[in-house]
Amino acid sequence: MSNVVISTYCLILTAQLCYSVCLHDSAQQDTDVVSPPAVVSHARMFRRSTTWEPQLPLRVTPWYLPGESALLTPSQSTQLQSAMREVTQIISNMLSVHRSEGPLLLNRDMNKYCRSVWGDPSLLNYKRCGSRDISYHGERCLDVVIPDSHLHGYEVWPMNDTKPDHVTPDGTGVPNTDFLLYIRVAQTEKCALHPSVIAYASYCQLDHSGRPIAGVMVFCPKHLRDGVNRHQHVVQVCLHEILHALGFSSSLFEHWIDCSFSGHGCSSRSRVTNTDETGQLRVYTPNVMQRMGNHLGVGSVGAPLENQQENQISSHWESRIMQGSILLASLSPPHLTSLDPITLAAFQDMGWYGVNTSIDNRLVWGKGAGVHFGLPSTCLERLEGFFCRDEGDIGCHHLHLDKGNCSTDAFMDGCRIYKPLLHGGECWLNQENQESDEIYHHQSRCFLSNLTKEMEDEKVKGRCYLHRCLAPNTYQIKVRGSEWTDCPAGRRIEVKGFHGVLLCPDGRLCLGFDQAPAPTSVFTTTPFYSLFSQRPIQEIRVQLTIEKNLKWTTEIKKILTEEILGVIAQHIGVQRCLLQASTVLDKDLSFLLKVGEPNNCHPHPTGTSPHALIMKLIDNPVTYMSPQFSTITIRILSSGSHDHILSHLGLIGGCSGALLCAVLTLAVCWCKHRARVLQVRDIYHSQP
Ligand SMILES: *[C@@H]1O[C@H](CO)[C@@H](O)[C@H](O)[C@H]1NC(C)=O
Ligand SMILES: *[C@@H]1O[C@H](CO)[C@@H](O)[C@H](O)[C@H]1NC(C)=O
Ligand SMILES: *[C@@H]1O[C@H](CO)[C@@H](O)[C@H](O)[C@H]1NC(C)=O
Ligand SMILES: *[C@@H]1O[C@H](CO)[C@@H](O)[C@H](O)[C@H]1NC(C)=O
């Protein structure tokens, strides 16, 4: 019973904070893999026939099985397809291949369609199929039946004749495709056994060089159904799974090839993984070793794999040493995860792909910490600014976007790290909070501190304060009510007006690692309609244009309105709680937006009137791709109060076009708020 409660809580409240397990290894074990007949299983050399051709972006084609998506509503399907589009875009940005000519055709497994093969070398049809297996029902990719139109044909030959007995012709194939991904939505046994799993994938066909050319991704429908604003989470899981299917799979390690030497061939890499003297399994390929060495600040070292299951090579990096990587067995929330350089290096070393080296997602965890970083035997003593000691201790996640809870999991081998709090630890998420001196804002980060206005002793723990960058690794901080205060990296500071100290992290902030997510990708935990202003300033009409037709239920209107408010807040840089919808979204897709400063919402840190900021949107509609509702354009119409302002100026009759109105309104606002705008400039341009 408590399991049910926890998972529901996870899904509804903090969907992006659930940790998912990955079922790739187990799905792969259940998948029959077919290679082209030409590949003799022990061939060591592969002809590189296309060296002179340029490598072009990898085209992943998702193939949605007809009928299966009946499990989803049209809007859920749209959401899924939009996540897949994003993932295929990331992949084609990252990987390139020598494309083969013509449409992609998959292979049939001769052992399945053929019952016997002519075995006498003197025969004309030596090695050809001599009799058909009448029980043959085509090919599968895990449990997806591959359409005949995607498959090569096959022939059955008489003993000594030039005409085949039976011909199944080639299918038409799938055009413009380098990797075909069957998408299945089904409540499979695996989904049922692992309720936290959103999707899993495996590959089922290899080309002559061993590169996967087809695979399947299974979505567990429960998550797509319950999903609200889980877009980034779904994208992350799809990306993780597709990376397995494209090559980062323990079952493919032995297929990785080395194409580095000149000449026309690639050779099979004899062995990709090995165990080091401490018993840690590692990937030893050239780019991986070099990049891992760079990262830890040592010469060159193999990259560690998860050693969870004995006697089984994992398809994931070691959690203790690679926190933040997209290829961990236990994924962190999307905004704390990246396509890290070691993973990119592994794709280089597979030999099948060109890898876009300008993707520059640095790994922060363990940076420069040396070759002995993260050993289970020492991680509770040598914290090195990464690990933590006391279970339940509240500190900061290592990227300092979120507060963290010192804890461990099945993959940490007893080491403890600050994991992002399940609820309410997102310093970067604009929200009201009860704890006095903290500020939750897009520009806030987590700091270890015991700052307090009171005289009593405070425990040092993770707290959220504003920060602003002055230069790389150089920043200032602001506690509620304090001035901006320099925070020299690596030092502890005091803040005027407060007792206690604050620790300024070194090498973590203002280096481009800590990107707070856009509000559309997260679930705002602020209850709808609860923060509304006691002191409204202005009302503004907001008009939406939506590309797709939606079925308007009250629920959808609420979700959409909430999303729009988040987007506006993000776009103009004000706290979300300053905005409220004072009317329900009407038939013309417009609603009235009220801008106010409710008592429980912190003053806007820049001091500018949010209303003035919103008015800037009059001439500049915001268009964005909503995770759930297709492309949306937000326009601010002439303000609810503009008649009032204009009538003061005696201009109301003369205002004919909306543009003129807008210009006048802006002018009025500009005058009204000039003093405050200047103040903003002072804050942002003053030298420390
Ligand atoms: C490589 O990645 C960069 C940064 O993401 C991107 O701007 C560029 O278009 C990519 N190159 C290719 C060929 O996809
Ligand atoms: C098959 O044909 C080849 C020549 O085409 C001939 O030498 C051979 O004897 C034939 N074998 C049988 C079993 O008919
Ligand atoms: C931190 O994690 C522990 C379990 O490891 C849990 O009991 C505790 O409630 C968590 N604290 C917070 C604030 O989330
Ligand atoms: C804050 O922490 C420091 C270092 O642990 C300690 O010396 C100081 O007394 C604490 N101050 C308050 C106000 O709790």
Image: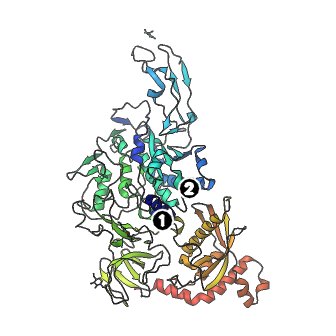
Q: Residue furthest front?
A: 1
Dot 1 crowding, Cα within 10 Å, few <14, some 14–19, many 20+: some
Give the residue drawn at x 44%, y 88%: 481
Tell me the amino acid under the disc marked 2: Arg
Looking at the rendered structure, the secondary structure element under dot 2 is helix
Tell how many labels: 2
- Rendered residue at 26%/55% (across/down): 300
Instruction: Return the x and y of residue 292 as percentages of the image width and height.
Output: 30, 57
Horizontal side of residue 143 vs 642, given as left or right: left
Q: Above or below — where is 324 with respect to 207?
A: below
Instruction: Give the residue number, with chain letter if any, for mark 1.
Output: 14
Report if the beta carbon of the residue with label 1 is closer than 8 angstroms to ligand 3.
no
Position of the N terminus by quadrant: bottom left
What residue does disc 2 label?
225
> Farthest residue toward the right?
653
Image-quarter location of ligand 4: bottom left
Where residue 184 appears, as percent x and y from the top left, is 53, 45
Rendered location of residue 679, percent (x, y): 52, 88
